[in-house]
Image (cartoon, rainbow, N blue to C red):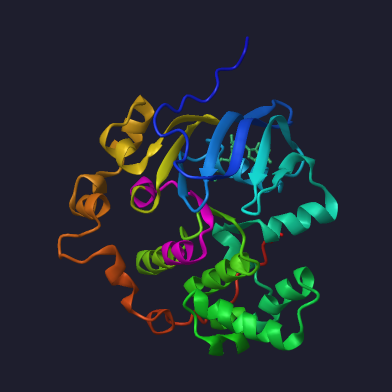
Amino acid sequence: MSAPTATPTRSAAPTGPVVLTLDDVSVDYLVEEPVHAVRNVSLQLGRGEVLGLAGESGCGKSTLAYAVTRLLKPPAVITSGTIEFQSREGYAVDLRALHGEDLRRFRWDKVAMVFQGAMNSLNPVIAIRAQLEDVYQTHRPEMGKRERRQRAGELLERVGVDRSRLRSFPHELSGGMRQRVMIAMALALEPQVLIMDEPTTALDVVVQREILDEISRLRDELGFAVVFITHDLPLLLEISDRIAVMKDGRIIELADARTLYTQPQHEYTRTLLSSFPSLTGERGAFVRTGVDETGATTSGTTDTPVAAAEEPDQSAPAPHEEDEA
Ligand SMILES: Nc1ncnc2c1ncn2[C@@H]1O[C@H](COP(=O)(O)OP(=O)(O)OP(=O)(O)O)[C@@H](O)[C@H]1O
């Protein structure tokens, strides 16, 4: 029996040039009872677009993201499909064919990833400056020390953290600041695709909002595309150009954000939308129009400088987690 393929019906293709194409991608976890975590997923990511990936826990969102960045480890196996990156310079890369040094370089240079727990993967005993400079030292060995220093400072400021924080150690920064540092690292080599897996879920809503505004601003400035993964559908409706809804490893609906909200086709999408009461209440107005009940707009939240808005978190650093690179 042939497996049904993804059934996105409307706005299935991005309007502009494409940066990433997934065709019939499937991933299994080869455990005693194999788990078909991703099934026959086909989608395209437009250059510079924000594609939201929604769906309940366990539907395969992270597995798909790991497949794209080739970070899957056994027992996970990509069992079918192609993943192709189309560079803005005009060449195409078959991601499944990349190995070793080529893969490592590609991952930081072209496609970067930020995870929910990424802020905990900063090395607690190394100052932020050295950790940022290390990215350049590794990937741009031709770059001189002075330029590395300069770039590290610029990077930090780019994500809204004062340059003086270069001297700080991770435990001297709030969770929001540490996550910003991770975003800065991911952007260090100016990738064309940024994959964000629940990047702000662990943060409080104000900090989350500030970081999301920052990501939107950076996307406008630098032109990278974003795959944004979260359970939070209202949030995706706000920040995404298009949204893909995943269920049981498949993409069951893919549409531009407004269409998905106003004319959901799939019963599951309707259920997902109705499970967020905020969409019909006050925040719903904010989601739909970008203006909340007090008249504040989305952009209004960026006025507070981050360094002032976020109190340093003096608690002990969280245990080291595996980094994405
Ligand atoms: N190492 C593993 N071994 C076996 N099964 C796994 C493994 N990792 C994930 N799975 C299974 O694969 C499926 C997809 O998991 P995945 O983590 O990709 O979902 P998700 O949508 O990202 O969930 P969440 O939102 O909770 O992170 C789930 O059924 C999960 O139990």
> Where is 265 relative to 107, above or below?
above
Is residue 222 highlighted in magenta? yes
Residue 111, how many percent across, how many down? 64, 54
Residue furthest to the left: 294
Residue 193 relative to residue 276: left or right? right
Is residue 194 highlighted in magenta? no
Residue 49 relative to residue 317: left or right? left
Residue 284, how many percent across, how many down? 23, 50
> Where is 203 relative to 92, above or below?
below
Residue 218, how many percent across, how many down? 47, 66
- Numbered label tally: 0
Q: Quadrant of ligand 1?
A: top right
Q: In this orientation, which residue lies closer to the viewer: 309 or 7? A: 7
| Quadrant hosting residue 24 | top right
Q: In this orientation, which residue lies closer to the viewer: 183 or 278? A: 183
Q: Quadrant of the N terminus?
A: top right
What residue is rendered at 54% in x and 87% in y? 163
Task: Please state the extent of the stretch shown in magenta in the rendering.
Answer: 215-236
